[in-house]
Amino acid sequence: MPGVAEKLEARHKGEVLLAARKIEYGEDDDPVEMCFQRGWSDGLPVTPPTDVRVLQMLKGTNRKPDEVVGKIPPYLAECTVEKVAINAVMAGCRPEYMPVLLAALEAALEPVFTLHGVLATTYFSGPVIIVNGPVTKRIGMNSGINALGQGNRANLTIGRALNLIVRNVGGGRPGEADRATLGASSKITLCFAEDESDPSWEPLSVARGIAPGKSAVTLFQGHGPEAFVDQKSRTPEALTRSFAMSLVKIGHPKLVQSARAILVLSPEHYAIYREAGWDRRKIERALYEATIRPGKDLVAGGDGVGEGIPASRAGEMVPKFHEDGLMVVRAGGAAGLFSAILPGWLAGRNRLELQPVTKEVRD
């Protein structure tokens, strides 16, 4: 809890530094319940963003409170660093998370991320955040046991804060601009760090153009995780074929080049590849090739199933993904021959218009 110094700062600097509209409430009012009543919550309790808490959050970045980060869809409302800090407080972030959150927001606002589309689609997707580099250790992110689950404050609150910004600044509320038929956990939070403990492994950020040793976030339009189990394959070739059997089912087994995917490779599965000398590029290429199938098996109407490709492609060998449509990320606990698949938004068929985005963490 902030102390006397912070309270004095809020009293003397709050009116100067903070521009957001203040909400007054009575002594008998519960500010947490007020946030629920006014629609500022994602359905979970939020931390009331007092002046003291917001000023504390702003100490996590050297960027000015009135700097405009961008316009948040669907209403294209201007979002300042101060508004980022307000939502970071509400999500439960610590100040040192601010540089990662700001980088994630900037990535989400890149045109090729199509944040408005991710928000408004009837599909499941939301922003998936993968963090690389020294910042993951500095702020205590989880890349190990239960990395995609609960229990780590940084993982959960950074992802939550980004979604709250879309809701509270941009107006992206379920049933309004958010038209998801069912939704998914990524609409609340799905954020984790990549396991970079093996120096021979090329981190995702480096593979996507960030210099080694730098911190970065990668945003992906996806949901999940979907479980993958193979406790018997012991060669990289067998494991790759096994992964392919699950990857081709994304969306629908007959849908092709419609979505990207992330394979979250657990340590025990990764060890099978590492011991055979397979690196990131070889794994990703092998997975792409293993998911190419005969067009005759994918034709619409075949086997009495309406979904599928046109009959004119029956003679082709058809890839499930575009050549850059699969990304591999390492994470997870040391025990368990389980990995995970994070499927992407089906609008991925527009490959050049819809892409994952990677941004360096600046602060």
Image (cartoon, grey):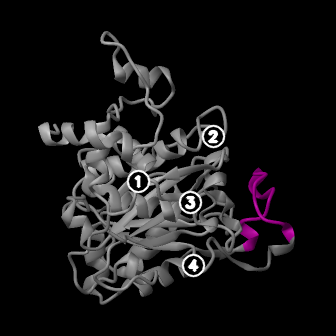
State how far apart marks 1 and 4 are (Cα). 38 Å
Q: Position of residue 308 (x, y in %)?
A: 75, 60
Q: Nearer the viewer, residue 149 or 71?
A: 71
Q: CA distance from mark 1 to mark 3?
A: 34 Å
Is residue 256 visible in the rendered structure shown here?
no
Task: Examine the rendering and report whether any part of residue 271 can be seen.
Answer: yes
- What is the magenta range? 295-311
Q: Which residue is mark 1?
A: 65
- Which quadrant is the C terminus positioned in? bottom left
The part of the image, by quadrant, that contains residue 293 is: bottom right
**Mark 2 or mark 3: which comes first in sequence?**
2
Q: Which residue is mark 2?
A: 178
Q: Residue furthest right?
A: 312
- Residue depicted at 67% across the width and 44% down the height: 122
Q: Nearer the viewer, mark 1 or mark 3?
A: 1
On residue 344, the disc is: 3
Q: How many marks?
A: 4
Amino acid at dot 1: Pro
Disc 4 residue type (three-letter): Asp
